[in-house]
Each structure stands twice: as structure tokens, then as C-alpha cells.
Amino acid sequence: MIILTAQEMQQADRQAVEHYGVPSICLMENAASAITEVALHRHPQAQRMAVLCGKGNNGGDGFAAARMLHNRGIAVEVLYFGSLKEARGDARTNLEICRKMGIPLSTIRTPRQLEAASPVLAEADLVVDALFGTGLARPLEGLWAAVIELVNALPVPVLAVDVPSGIGGDRGAVEGPAMRAAATVTFGALKPFHVLPPASEFCGEVVVADIGIPMEVLEGLSTLRLATAEELRLFLPDRPRDAHKGAFGHTVCVCGSMEKPGAASMACLGALRAGAGLVTAASVPEVLARVAGHAYEAMGLALDATPARTIARGALPRLLAFLQDKDALVAGPGLSTLPDTDAFIRDLVLSTALPLVLDADGLNAFVGQTHQLAKREAPTVLTPHPGELARLLETSVEEVQADRIRAARRAAELTGATVVLKGRLTLTALPGSTTWINPTGNAGMATGGMGDLLSGMIGSFLGQGLPPEQAAPLAVFLHGLAGDLAAKATGLPALLPRDLVDFLPDAFKALDDQEED
């Protein structure tokens, strides 16, 4: 599902009007019709509605919705926060229509006028918030803050037009007073703040309405997508009836150490559950012994060890020879950050032409040398958590978290790799292209081993022939969906990575069943 930034949405509006010849007043009319239908559908018993209008096009949508609600028998009162001469264009047209129709309209420009109009809000069954649209660039204060605080304190539901007033920008931040809506009607496409917290928590249920902007315009401008089952099921690899195990790839997991043997098991289980035909764990003997007890469908390749029982740099020739006819590589989980192992992983990454998933200590091996990753010509997927990405970008975790989309895209640009930034609403940034926002997953998944499982799944899909732009968002969605299904059975605190292994078949079935739905 496409997501448009505020700037992209403005471009879409302009193209619809200037290139396709859609009259702007028609776009406003369609928006008002959508607002009206949502208001009446969600609140069928409402008899009195207050519509808060600003002086821009968002307010124009509100004026147009007010007259439509009036025509449907609703007692509507408009509170206009501006002067009559400040309303221009289509907004002014709809304001004048409201006046000619005799719809009660109060102009609010002072705190005293707001206080005098407060009974209108208190007695309403629904408040329609059409004060500010997506272009807000500063925190609200003064009269604007006062009306938001007044409405938020009332036990009256709010329907926001495009975005709850007070929310601006595309990062999902809330930097001042903001309206708390029970629902939001937006137009053409979702916006980032409808999805990204904390702003998304102010939006309530979000309804996307078609107002007549050509889909070609919206698709052409979008650089963000919300992952959905309907789209991602199309990425599932085919399983022909006459296929054999060699048809679904051989994924090799270079993972684990004496201190972190479970990482290899989880990566192998992820690869197996995601449909790999063959999986090999390549690690030190102590790790292989653990894998054999947990992921016994996986094969093993014993590699030379350091005195600390991590993979030694001298193991590289044996591993490279083994990889000659393999299909995908997962490297990094549980390897440790000892110098000899760091050197091994850097040499491996830069020596193999296999599609690669690089995670955990594999990423840490490139701290201070992130540019080296751009030398790889084969498909590469990086799967950092915020701390790992901060180290790769030589910045702080706080800066990464302040604008996760920007940070993930920057890493993709620097490395030429697909970057999966894990966390709430995991992001998949494709270099020079789309960024996927993933809605599945939950707080119970914040435990060690979850990322190892995900890396194995991505590696499995790469081995089955999917390109990174399909393998990564598909694995992320399924991984989170399995977590959601498992959490219903275990509860959040008790959720373990091994639970996801058990529920991955249900996640696959749920995704594949979308075709029947």
C-alpha cells in the first residue's frame, strides 16, 4: 500500500490539476463526500456535529463537508478560525456556500470568542477537525493550542480531516499539542504520520479515500510502502509439483561461536522454515554439535577455530571452496568480535559473489569500514538493529531513532545494499528506491535470537531466487506475522524465538490464503 509524504502529496495534487485537468474544486468535493460518509457511517446516531475549519484547503474540505452533512439532516455548526478575507480559492467558495445555505458559522479569532463557542463543542455528538492539513511545519500555540486542549478534554469523538491538527512533518514526531482523533479520513494515500508512532497513536482508525487523483500519479510519486499481505503474497516463491530439493536453493549459515551457539541454530531454523531446499551450518565443531540437536535437518561444515573457539581467519579457503555451487549466504549471528574472526568475516564478505545476508557481528566487523560493503556486486541485505546501524553510520542511536527512514536510506545509499532496520515497524530500505514499512510484529519479539531467525529466512528466500527487494520485505512480514500468531498463544512476556519457528507454517498459510480471500 503506497504512502506519500506531505511534499509528494502536494505534487500529486498539482499533477492531477495541471496535467490531467481534474478541477481542484472537484478534488475538494470528493474529499468532503468521503468525510461525510465516514462521519455518518461511524456515528449513525449523531444529530449534532461541530466542524472546525482553518483558512486553507483543509478548512475548505471542512466547509464542503458541513454543507453535505447539513443536506443529510445533521444539525451542523461551523467554527471558522480565521477572517473571511483570509479564505481563498476553493475554500472561500465553500465558505460562501455555507453562509448562503444559512449554516451556523462562528468566526473565532480570540480566546474570548473560543470560550463563547465552547458550548457548541460540548453539545456536539461529533467534532470534525479540519483546522490544519499535512503542511504544518511548527508546533501549535496560542489560540490553536487552546482549541485542541479544549476538544481533547471533552468526551466527544473527533473525526480528523487528512491528519489530526497539530501533527506535521513526516517523521511521526509530535512536538506540540495535537488533536486526538477517533478516526482520520485521508485522501489518495496514507501519509507517514498515519503509520509511524507516536503520531499514528493520535489518528485512530485511518480511512484512505479516493478523491479522483489518477493512480498513475500516486504510484509514480511514492517512495514508501506499507507492507500488506495482498502485495507480499505475490513474492512467495513457486513450489512446482515436480520440484526437488535442489530447486529451492542451498543456503549456508556462517554463524555461532562457543559463547553464542544458539545463533546458528536459529538462523538455520529460519532458513529451513522459509522453504530452503538445503541448509548448511558452517561453524566451529562445538556450534555444529548444538545445531545438530536443534535443527537436525541442517547439514554441517566444520571450520577452523581460534583459541576462543570462534571461526578463525584461516578457515576462509575451505569455506570459499565449499560455497562454489551454493545459492545464498547468511553471515554474522553469534560470531563474536574477536580480531581474527572480524578479519575472517570481512574477507568472506568481499570474496564471495553469493547473495548475502549480513547481520549482528558481521555488521560489527565493518564498523569504520562501511564503505567497503559498497564493493560487493552481488545482492546484499544488511539487517541491523538501531545500535548496529548507528555504529555503521558513525552516529548515535538517538539520531537513528529520531528519523529511522532517513537513517535506513542513508545506509542503503552508502553500501548499495538493501537495509532492514529492525524494531517497531521494521523498515526495509532498497537502494535508490522504495522503503517498506512493516506493520507485523509485537513487543514480545524484543528478545535475543529473533534477528537470527529473520536473517535465516531472508537468506532462504535469496537462495530460492528472490531478489533482495522481494526477499527482505517478505521475510520481515512473515517473521512479524508468526510473532503475532505465537503471541496469541503464549502472551508477550513468554514469547521465544522457538515459538516463531513453530508458528511460521501458520504465517505462510495465512499469507497464501490471501489469494482465496
Image (cartoon, rainbow, N blue to C red):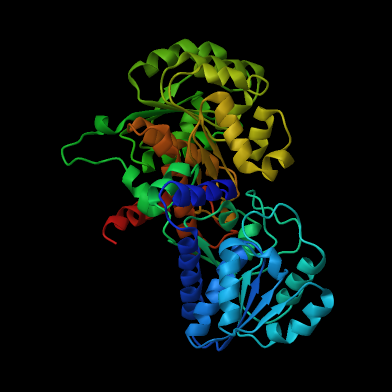
Q: Quadrant of residue 154?
A: bottom right
Please indicate whether residue 396 sits to the left or right of residue 65 in the image: right
Q: Quadrant of residue 124?
A: bottom right
* Residue 227, image x, y percentages: 45, 50
Residue sitting at x 26%, y 29%:
246
Residue 14 higher or lower than 243, as above or below:
below
Residue sitting at x 38%, y 43%:
273
Between 53 and 389, the one lying in front of the other is: 53
Please indicate whether residue 391 sits to the left or right of residue 440 in the image: right
Residue 428 higher or lower than 332, as above or below:
below
Figure disc tally: 0
**Quadrant in which the C terminus appears:** bottom left
* Residue 59, image x, y percentages: 62, 67
Give the residue furthest to the left.
Answer: 242
Residue 84 higher or lower than 191, as above or below:
below
* Residue 208, image x, y percentages: 47, 62
* Residue 334, image x, y percentages: 57, 32
Residue sitting at x 65%, y 28%:
392
Between 158 and 313, the one lying in front of the other is: 158
Q: Quadrant of residue 195?
A: bottom right
Residue 498 in sight in this render? no
Residue 102 higher or lower than 317, as above or below:
below
Residue 302 in sight in this render? yes
